[in-house]
Amino acid sequence: MSQSVPAAEIVFPDGLVGLPALVHHHLSAVPETALYEIASDDDPTMAFIAASADSVKPGTTDLLRERGLVNEGEWVLAILAVHGEPPAITANLAGPLVLDMNSATARQLVLEDPEFPLQAPVAQPG
Amino acid sequence: MLVLTRRAGQAIRVGPNVEVRVVRIEGDRVVLGIAAPRHVAVVRSELVDEVSGEVREAADTRAKLRVMLKPMHALDGPAPETPSPDDPGVA
């Protein structure tokens, strides 16, 4: 199912980890996928694709909530990148994004936990 | 930068709720124990750099990722709607 949705403005008050100037972003769905695109309004070269962290590692949101890192109603995304040859998609579980859509604000966590690797492999069909 | 000398077993306090204790010293490695509230993130500095680098890598490889996504519906599931405050299923 493909659905066109309006973009949502998201503010990271503290910026991204190590990139504090990246405060203002737009979130939109990537057509025909279960993925999202987050594009910085502060730096046009900084845009990336993200997936629900639970789709990469089931139970992530609940686990982070139990640890007091995610509040009720917040939503956790993992940033995707491409590594290696042949290229493979990985998810950054060590630095997940936590979004509060009620306030349109977000933050990036840093998780010191081998259960949440920097480059978690993402299953690909075929 | 404040520089302190501590022996194994001794500790320092950072603010009212954080304690950093020298657990033991092994050659050129120092083993630290850190007691902090759950909401205080305690991570290695190099991990912060790695996370930041991975964000840049994600931006650099976004075009390649989009090409890879074309023939597949990644992470099988319904196409998402951008979450909104009216959507109770955001969590």
Image (tube, rainbow, N blue to C red):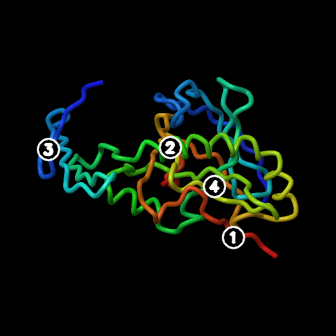
Viewer-side label of 3, 4: 3
Residue A104 vs residue A18, the one in the foreground: A18
Label 4 element class? strand
Query: x, y (%) of residue B82?
Result: 64, 46
Q: At 52% from the left edge and 44% from the top edge, which residue is drawn?
A: B86
Residue B9 vertical placement versus A38 (above, below)? below
Residue bearing the label numbered 3: B11
Residue bearing the label numbered 1: A123
Label 3 element class? strand
Distance from Cα at disc 2 to Cα at disc 3:
36 Å
Viewer-side label of 2, 3: 3
Residue bearing the label numbered 4: A51
Distance from Cα at disc 4 to Cα at disc 1:
12 Å
3 and 1 marks in contact (CB < 8 Å): no
Residue A33 vertical placement versus A47 (above, below)? below
- The amino acid pointed to by label 4 is Ala
Query: x, y (%) of residue B12?
Result: 15, 39
- Quarter of the N terminus of chain A within the rendering: bottom right
Q: Which chain carries label 4?
A: A
- Label 3: how many Cα within 10 Å (few below 14, some 14–19, many 20+): some
- The amino acid pointed to by label 3 is Ala
Q: Is residue A100 left or right of residue B61?
A: left
- Sequence order check, earlier mark of 2 and 1: 2
- The amino acid pointed to by label 2 is Leu
Which image quadrant is residue B41 in? top left
Q: At 23% from the left edge and 46% from the top edge, which residue is drawn?
A: B37
Label 1 element class? loop
Distance from Cα at disc 3 to Cα at disc 4:
41 Å
Residue bearing the label numbered 2: A99
Residue B22 vertical placement versus B6 (above, below)? below
- Image label count: 4
Q: Is residue A117 left or right of residue A87?
A: left
